[in-house]
Amino acid sequence: MNRSRLEPLGVPASEYAYDAAERKSRQPTALDRWLVRQIRERYGDDPVRLALWDEPDVTPRPGTAIVRVLDSKALLQLVMNPELHFGDLYSAGRIDVRGDLLTVLGVAYQAHAEKSKLRRWLDRGRQFAAPDLHESRRNIHHHYDIGNRFYELWLDREALQYTCAYYPTAEATLEEAQQAKMHHVARKLRLRPGERVVEAGGGWGGFALFMAKNYGVKVRSFNISKEQIAYAREWAKRQSLQDSVEFIEDDYRNVSGEHDVFVSIGMLEHVGAGNYRELGRVASRALTKNGRGLIHSIGRDKPAPLNPWIDKRIFPGAYPPTLREMMEIFEPNGFSVLDVENIRLHYAKTLEGWLERYEQNVEAVRSMFDEAFVRAWRLYLTGSIAAFVHGNLQLFQVLFARTGDNSIPWTRAHVYGGG
């Protein structure tokens, strides 16, 4: 394996590489077979069956899958810590899946074992994480600065939105759903021409440009991803919107100036629960007396971290909060929550659209990176679908304004009825 091409994942090639010829010549030990029997007895063989490398490589029947473990060390790693090691072993080709990968991951979520006391203690520690600016920059660089071209291959083609879309109908395209999401948020915020909007975490700039173009607002968008900021500034020039949108390469903690609207789409997951009060102070400092805001974020039903493999290889430092945890943004800073909407299933459908396009462009991804990267991102996108369908991940949109502000709509007609 080429170490430089594994760098975006941080996968140690020496740890997960193995000699295929040596593996094929080595018969499973009695311990290997005993471990597989224990797993089969505990979880059964339907619809997912665990198999060792000496068993026939057969095609599973529709609706089922076979997980083939291809060497003894892989089996031991899988038993010891499946949440962490399955991803690296699958990426390295030491675990293979015959059949539907989504079926495998759905079963894994539904049959998730009770965590050890140590694991629960470690997870609880993540609830209070407060990454500083240096750590935040490192985490964002790991995920977002691996190349704009990579994301262009499979995100929507009009606004390059790497957040949950909103499907007004089941037949809507990914592009239509992302446009609908941005209109949905803009209507909730009641954007009016000439208003000043500050955006915390602007991605490639698609939403900031959308707001300026469609609602006539002035936008200042803060982001610490160097590649995304460069992309967004060039995009603004091509649309002649550089006078309406300012893309600022800086952390949300350094937001300054007075604004009518504060919006954050898909950034809270990177903030760290220990920084929620500060984020609320930033919003309070930035908003006028009658200002309003919206935060759109992946969340949880109850406190828990993201899958440890995703945290280590894909989204370092990410934490999806519960609604109760999100209240740390609002309660200490004089804000009232006006509306909460959960569009969880819309995220599952968004991910299905991303995965379909990813597979359509998989050869281009392979040419940019390597097979381990291809498999890792396939697992990440598929696993995320399973997490929203079978797990307890949610997608919250929380609308807020200052306590005591009575200049709020009487009904939701402006959101759903176009009024």
Image (cartoon, rainbow, N blue to C red):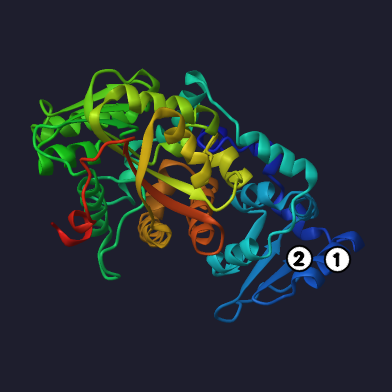
Q: Where is residue 28 in the image (x, y as percent from the top left)?
A: 84, 62
Q: Can residue 321 be seen in this view?
A: no
Where residue 49 sits, quadrant-wise, is bottom right
Q: Is residue 246 above or below residue 124?
A: above
Q: In the picture, which quadrant includes the N terminus?
A: top right
Q: What element carries label 2?
A: strand
Q: Position of residue 202 (x, y in %)?
A: 30, 34
Q: Are marks 2 and 1 in contact (CB under 8 Å)?
A: yes
The disc labelled 1 sits on which kind of residue? Arg
Q: Which mark is residue 52?
A: 2
Question: 370 or 134, which is in the foreground?
Answer: 134
The residue carrying pointer 2 sits among few (fewer than 14), some (14 to 19) or many (20 or more) residues within 10 Å by Cα, namely many
Q: Which residue is drawn at 39% across and 21% down?
A: 253
Q: Quadrant of the C terminus?
A: bottom left
Q: Which mark is residue 338?
A: none
- Which of the 4 image quadrants contains residue 69? bottom right
Q: In this view, does 96 lie to the left or right of 22?
A: left
What element does badge 1 sit on?
helix
- Left or right for 40, reference 367: right
Residue drawn at (68%, 43%) of the image: 16
